[in-house]
Amino acid sequence: MSDVHSAASEGFAREALRYSRGRPDYPRELLSWLRGQLRLGPDSTVVDLGAGTGKFTQLLLQAGAKVTAIEPVDAMRAQLGRNLPGVKALAGTAQAIPLADGAADAVICAQAFHWFATREALAEIHRALAPGGRLGLIWNVRDESVDWVAAISRIITPYEGDAPRFHSGAWRQVFDGTLFSAMQETTFAHQHVGGAQKVIIDRCLSISFIAALPAPEKARVADKLKALIVTHPQLKDRPVIAFPYQTRAYWCIGV
């Protein structure tokens, strides 16, 4: 998996179950977006590229399209198979998509494109799309305008290292107008509702560069998160927490 960053290959392999358990789903409003902007429906084929454990794959199935999931990390793909046993899931990377030219009407990268935002990968995505095919990029982004969410970011950000991140904006640089039309953006408000263990602890420990940490350091991160939960006035003694997100959805058309 030389095309896969070490933080992703190591971290996601270690914490595939925690990823499946702790990551938020996606807002229902994205169904209309998928059908309208990506034109997904019963007669369309879509690739879920970097599908992980199938969090977004579930929404694609609800859109009615024929779905192929592609995921390079074996543990993540195995978890996807357990979660969605009827979905065709293939080993592959964005730089080597195991499909014929023009096989897909749309390619979706949910919580993933920043890992492989290179011209090589974009050209490969373009190859796999039918003429006029559409590319969708989706991220659930923590809403750091909320005080305790910003505090969580302060705990985990020092461990980022060189791991690619959505918030850096570096992923945008590969879109120069030669392969795809100008990017269109829509933002949806979203919440991940549940107990603190699920929506904060499991969510944060499933982040690639946190998941890849040695066990003692990962335990220290968990302890800092637990301390925040029991001391912050908006978190302590709350059996149910609504973790706020902004879901950023982007699309463009192959040219």
Image: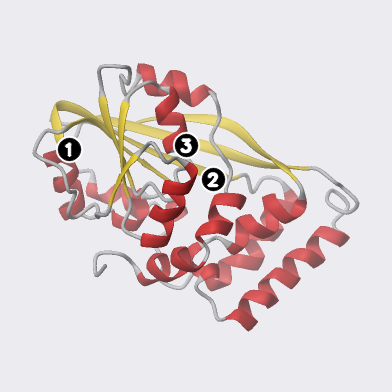
In the image, residue 36 sits, relative to residue 156, either above or below, namely above
Task: Name the disc covering residue 177, or none.
Answer: 1
Identify residue type, mark 2. Val
Most foreground residue, 55 or 167: 55
Sequence order check, earlier mark of 3 and 2: 2
Task: State if disc 3 and disc 1 touch (CB < 8 Å).
Answer: no
Instruction: Work out which quarter of the rendered image holds the N terminus and state it.
Output: bottom left
Q: In the shown orientation, is residue 188 left or right of residue 153?
A: left
Q: Position of residue 188 (x, y in %)?
A: 54, 29
Q: Position of residue 156 (x, y in %)?
A: 61, 66
Number of on-image labels = 3
Instruction: Work out which quarter of the rendered image holds the C terminus and state it.
Output: top left
Most foreground residue, 192 or 86: 86
Image colouring = secondary structure
Identify residue type, mark 1. Gly
Residue drawn at 81 percent across, 67 percent down? 227
Most foreground residue, 90 or 115: 90
Q: Position of residue 51 (x, y in %)?
A: 38, 46
Task: Name the disc covering residue 141, or none.
Answer: 2
| Disc 3 target residue | 248
